[in-house]
Image (cartoon, rainbow, N blue to C red):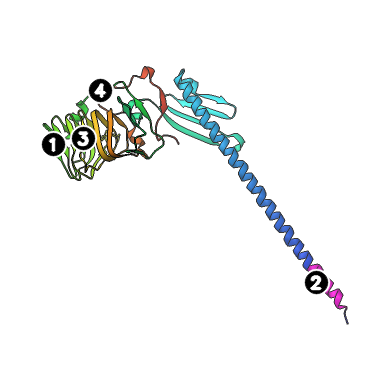
Amino acid sequence: MADKRKSEDGSVLGIVMVYFVVFSLTGLIFISLADQAHLQNVDAIHDYKNHWAVESAINEALWRLNNGPDSLATFQDSTLYSTYNEATMTLTVGTDQWDRPFEVSLEIELDHVFNNTFYTTMPIDTSDPAITFLSDDIDIQQADSLPTLDTTYYLQNAVEIYPTGAVLFDTLTSGIHYVKSGVTELKNNTYLEGTLLVLGKLKVVGTNVILKAGQDSSGAYLPALIVADSVTTTAITDITIEGAIISYGSFDIKSGTITGPFIGTDLNVQTSLIIDDQGSDQYYTYYPGFEDPDTSGTAKIIQKGSWR
C-alpha cells in the first residue's frame, strides 16, 4: 500500500508552486501598472511644462511685435519656435521637447475700441450688485471720446427707414432698421436680427425684447444697437441684446442681459443687468461706419476666439 503522507506532500508542493506562480505574475502586473502610471505622470508633467513654455513664448512674441519690426516675432529658443506671417497676421508657436509636441496658432489684429467689454467716457462701477458678470475675461477701458459714426453705410443698406420715430413690436424684418429722428419705442416681444440705428431717443416700454446682431453680405457681424441720443427703459422691461451696443447718450436700463461690447458715455443699472460675453467673440470686431483706427501707435493683440 502506498505511503499516504508522500502523496499528500506532493500535493502540497504542487499547491505551493501554483501560488508562487500566481503571486509572481500578480507582482509583475502591479509593477507594470506602477511603471505605466509613473510614465503617465511624467508625460503629464512634460505636457504642462510645454504648455507653460509655449504661452510664455507667445507673450514674448507679442512683446517683440509691439516693440520692433514684425520680423522679430520669428525666432528660435532652444526647443521653442515662433513664426509670424506678416501677410496673414498669423502667429504660430510650439515645441517638441521630450517628444511631446505642442503647437498653438492664433490670429493677430490691431487693437480697437470694440475689443473692450466696456469702452465708456464715464467709469463703470463693477462692484455694483445690480451688475452680474458671467465671464472672468472682462475688459473695461475709460475713453476720452467715442468713435465718430458715419451713417452712410447703414442708410444705404437699410431694409426699413423711419423718418420721424417708430413704434416697434413683434418680429421685424431682418436687417438694418434706420430711424432718422424722434422717439422710438420697443414694445412687448420685439425681435430683430440685424441692426437698430436710432438717431433720436430710444425707449424700451415692453418685455421680452430681443435685439440680435445680424451679418452683412460677407458674413461679418454688425452692431445690434446704435443710438445717437439717450436710452431709457420702464419697470417691466426685459431686454436682451446679443451684439455690440454703441450709445452716444445716457443708457439707463432696469433689467436685461447683454453680451458686449458696450461703447458709450455711461451705463446706469437700476435693478439687474447680466453681462454674458461667453461665446460672443464674433461681436468683438471693427464695424463699418466708424473711422479706421490709427495704426501708427496701435497695439497688436490676439484676436478673440482665434487660439487654436
Q: Which residue is mark 3?
A: 232
Q: Which residue is mark 1?
A: 166
Name the residue located 30 percent from the left edge and 22 percent from the top edge.
Answer: 292
Label 3: element kind:
strand
Residue kind at label 2, given as amino acid type: Ser
Label 1: element kind:
strand
Bounds of the magenta segment:
3-14
Q: Earlier in the sequence, mark 1 or mark 3?
A: 1
Q: Which residue is mark 2?
A: 11
Q: Earlier in the sequence, mark 4 or mark 2?
A: 2
Q: Earlier in the sequence, mark 3 or mark 2?
A: 2
Whether residue 185 is situated above or below residue 155 in the rendered picture:
below
Which percent across, then down, holds residue 61?
49, 25
Residue 249 occupies quadrant: top left
Residue 188 occupies quadrant: top left
Label 4: element kind:
loop
Q: Which residue is mark 4?
A: 148
Whether residue 131 is situated above or below residue 152 in the rendered picture:
below
User: Looking at the image, do the residues carrying marks 4 and 1 touch, with CB atoms under 8 Å apart?
Assistant: no
Residue kind at label 1, given as amino acid type: Ala
Taking the image as drawn, is residue 222 in sight?
no
The question of residue 4 being in magenta is answered with yes
Residue kind at label 4, given as amino acid type: Thr
Name the residue located 34 percent from the left edge and 25 percent from the top edge.
Answer: 142
